[in-house]
């Protein structure tokens, strides 16, 4: 299964944060606590580059513009938070 297919399968814009893989939820939780990619990697036993890659993928799925926006989208479970235009 390619990354695009996984992105569709775990589309957080449609299914909320519950569609995230457990490691991605752990990474987002660490982001919410203000940890850097390096610190997150040390905590979850992943390379810093792997954390950055997974975090970027989660941000794309959620439509988040930055780390703070990602945390807001995941915590509220509000898919409209991800859109600059709001609900349609």
Image: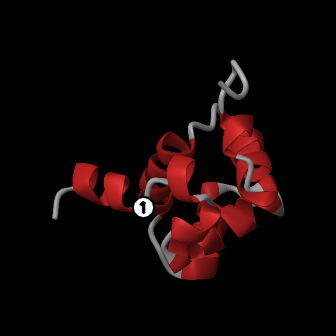
Whole-percent x and y of residue 75? 79, 58
Q: Which residue is mark 1?
A: 10
The residue nearer to you, when weighing 58 against 41, is 58
- Vertical arrangement, residue 13 with respect to residue 36, above or below: above
Q: Residue at x 57, y 45 (%)?
A: 62
**Residue depicted at 70% across the width and 28% down the height:** 87
Q: Locate residue 11 relative to residue 8 in the image: left or right.
A: right
- Residue at the left extreme? 1
Crowding near the residue tagged with mark 1, few <14, some 14–19, many ≥20 C-alpha atoms within 10 Å: many
Q: Which image quadrant is residue 64 in?
A: top right
**Which of the pair 80/29 is nearer the observer?**
80
Figure quadrant of the C terminus = top right
The answer to whether 22 is drawn above or below residue 54 in the figure is below
Q: 45 above or below 56?
A: below
> Relative to 32, does residue 69 appear above or below in the rendering?
above
User: Residue 29 appears at what percent x and percent y?
Assistant: 73, 68
Residue occupying image coordinates x 52% and y 67%: 20
The colour style of the image is: secondary structure
Query: Residue at the location (61% across, 57% down)?
Result: 37
């Amino acid at each position: 299964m390619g990354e695009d297919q996984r992105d569709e399968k775990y589309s957080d814009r449609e299914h909320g944060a519950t569609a995230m893989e457990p490691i991605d939820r752990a990474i987002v939780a660490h982001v919410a606590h203000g940890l850097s990619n390096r610190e997150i990697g040390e905590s979850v036993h992943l390379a810093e580059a792997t954390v950055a890659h997974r975090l970027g993928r989660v941000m794309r799925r959620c439509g988040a513009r930055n780390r703070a926006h990602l945390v807001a989208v995941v915590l509220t479970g509000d898919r409209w938070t991800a859109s600059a235009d709001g609900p349609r």
